[in-house]
Structures are given as structure tokens and as C-alpha cells.
Image (cartoon, rainbow, N blue to C red):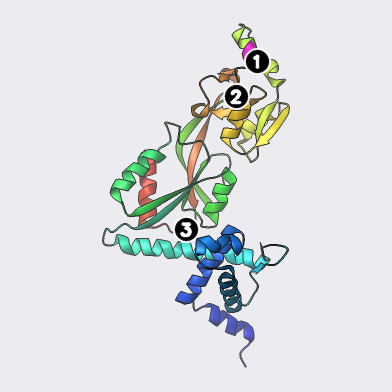
């Protein structure tokens, strides 16, 4: 008699159209965070979604998620399965786009994740690339998500995004990083901050004068150079968005590092000769993913600027 494990492997080796539908349902439920939250996205009721997930669990041979009064949560097997589901669906999309491109019929979508407050940078080639690609491939949809650098990288790794735009603050071996443009960053104070008032009175600030004031921190990894500088300041609040940094700096309570293009005109740059610097911004893609003709075309336009 053949072992059950081998039978299961043979069963899972055949993925039917109905399996693909159930797989997409599971992905949507996982991304929405539960059955109830995914009803509007899937267009069916909670009981139908529950039944579909149960069918997929039977098909796979393991439990994907916990559901009940304690709430929705993926099992360990479910989290692993979601990674492979993202890879499968990404490969299927790339295949469809490549087949369509044989007849110069560019269809499909490009999913791009970016860091926040980057569109206002005149050096950012994203806007010109979108315009050019819209003319080249009007049937391709370009989807954009604004996330933290770590979330961008994780999304590219799990197949949720074809491309990501992040600062060059680290290099993961599973990703390919390509320089895209350079962002200019400086230390800023709001017009009502004590340092700003000293400057308006004609005072000359020293490095130590600046280091006595609290600094807004970002809630994710940053480059070593910036991290070393920040360690010398008293720690202020921690935020995750550039806009939040700008708001706290504008209030005059804290200092904060901001891209120059994202700083309001009434903010004052503090000792630029000591604190201003340039940060390379990169486009990242998964090293092992074979990108479609559509994605490669968009990537080429990004590099052309």
C-alpha cells in the first residue's frame, strides 16, 4: 500500500482552476485579516468564505487559520502557505503578461511600493516613468503603495510587489538594489524652536548647542551614518512617517531630519555643514523572481529618468 504522505504529495501536485480560486480567497482573507473583513472584497457572505477556506484546508491537508471568538489568526502552516501562495500568484501573473506581450499586447499590472513623501522630490523619476509607461502600455495598471522601508522590502520578498523604492540603508542578499536617485536630507527646526529664535537673533550655533535638543526618531532601521548622528541627541518621540516628523518639527518642540524637498519653507536648516547629507535611493526587486516583460519595461523607464 502506498504511504499516505506520497498520496498527499500527488494530490497537491495537481492544481485545478477551483484550487486557484480557493487560493485567491485565502490570500484575500489573510490580507484583510479575517472572514468578516473580507466579505466586501470577495463579494460573498461570511459563511461562504468559511466553507471555501475549509475546502482549501481539506485539499491541502492542514489547518490554515484559527477563527472564532478569539478572532482570526493564521496558523504557522497558514503563514508558510501564504508565502507560497504569493509566489504562485505572482508567477501566474508574470506568465500571463509575458504571453500577451508576444503580440505586443501589454496587459496586466505592476505593483510598486514606495517610501512616503518621495513624490515631491524633483530627482524622483517615478512620475515621468508613470507618464511614459501610460503612453507605451495603456492597458497596464500601475498600483502604488506607500510603506516603511522594511515593509517595502518584505512585500517585494513575498511577491506582493514587483518593485520597491527604498533608501540605501542596508542590503538583503535576497534582493537586488539598483541606484535610482539621490535624496538631500538636512536637520530642521520649526520657527518657534529655541534654536530658530537664536538664529534669528544673529547667534552662531555650535555643534554642542544643537546636541542639547530633543530629536524626532523614526520607527525603523536607518543608515549607519544617520544612526550614529542621532545617538548623540536626547531622544524625542518615535514616528513612522515623514509627515509626522515634519508636523512635530513645525510645532517647534523638536528637531528632526527631513528630506529637503519635504520641508516647509519656514523650517530652518540647522548647521547644514555638520548635519546635512545625501542619501542614495534605490529600486529593489527580488533576486530569484523572473520578471515579466511589462515589469522590465517599467524598470527601464525608471532608470532613464
Q: Which residue is mark 3?
A: 289
- Residue 241, given in percent of the width and then of the height, sits at 59, 37
- 101 lies above or below 171: below
Residue at (53, 26) in percent of width and height? 263
Q: Which residue is mark 2?
A: 250
Please tell me whether residue 281 belongs to the stretch shown in magenta: no
Q: Nearer the viewer, mark 2 or mark 1?
A: 2
Callout 2 secondary element: helix
- Give, as a single range, the part of the protein colored magenta: 192-197
Residue at (63, 28) in percent of width and height? 248
Give the distance between the C-alpha atoms of the residues marked 2 and 1, in whole angstroms: 13 Å
Pick the residue in front: 227 or 239.
239
Q: Nearer the viewer, mark 3 or mark 2?
A: 2
Please tell me whether residue 193 belongs to the stretch shown in magenta: yes
Callout 3 secondary element: loop
Task: Give residue 272's quadrant in the image.
Answer: top right
Tell me which secondary structure the magenta stretch mostly adopts.
Answer: helix
- 292 lies above or below 135: below
Amino acid at each position: 500500500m502506498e504511504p499516505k504522505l506520497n498520496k498527499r504529495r500527488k494530490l497537491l501536485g495537481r492544481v485545478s482552476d477551483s484550487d486557484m480560486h480557493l487560493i485567491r480567497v485565502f490570500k484575500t482573507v489573510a490580507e484583510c485579516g479575517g472572514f468578516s473583513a473580507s466579505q466586501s472584497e470577495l463579494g460573498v457572505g461570511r459563511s461562504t468564505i468559511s466553507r471555501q477556506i475549509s475546502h482549501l484546508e481539506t485539499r491541502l491537508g492542514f489547518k490554515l487559520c484559527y477563527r472564532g471568538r478569539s478572532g482570526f489568526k493564521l496558523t504557522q502552516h497558514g503563514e508558510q502557505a501564504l508565502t507560497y501562495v504569493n509566489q504562485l500568484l505572482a508567477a501566474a501573473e508574470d506568465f500571463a503578461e509575458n504571453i500577451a506581450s508576444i503580440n505586443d499586447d501589454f496587459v496586466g499590472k505592476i505593483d510598486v511600493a514606495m517610501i512616503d513623501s518621495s513624490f515631491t522630490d524633483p530627482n524622483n523619476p517615478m512620475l515621468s516613468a508613470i507618464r511614459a509607461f501610460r503612453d507605451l502600455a495603456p492597458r497596464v495598471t500601475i498600483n502604488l503603495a506607500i510603506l516603511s522601508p522594511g515593509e517595502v522590502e518584505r512585500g517585494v520578498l513575498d511577491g506582493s510587489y514587483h518593485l520597491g523604492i527604498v533608501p540605501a540603508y542596508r542590503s538583503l542578499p535576497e534582493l537586488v538594489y539598483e541606484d535610482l536617485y539621490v535624496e538631500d536630507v538636512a536637520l530642521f527646526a520649526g520657527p518657534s524652536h529655541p534654536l530658530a529664535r537664536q538664529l534669528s537673533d544673529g547667534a552662531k550655533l555650535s555643534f554642542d548647542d544643537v546636541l542639547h535638543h530633543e530629536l524626532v526618531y523614526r520607527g525603523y532601521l536607518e543608515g549607519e551614518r544617520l544612526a550614529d548622528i542621532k545617538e548623540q541627541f536626547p531622544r524625542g518621540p518615535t514616528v513612522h512617517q515623514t509627515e509626522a516628523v515634519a508636523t512635530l518639527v513645525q510645532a517647534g518642540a523638536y528637531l528632526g531630519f527631513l528630506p529637503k524637498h519635504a520641508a516647509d519653507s519656514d523650517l530652518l536648516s540647522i548647521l547644514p555643514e555638520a548635519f546635512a547629507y545625501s542619501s542614495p535611493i534605490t529600486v529593489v526587486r527580488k533576486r530569484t523572481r523572473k520578471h515579466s516583460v511589462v515589469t522590465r519595461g517599467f524598470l527601464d523607464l525608471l532608470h532613464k529618468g
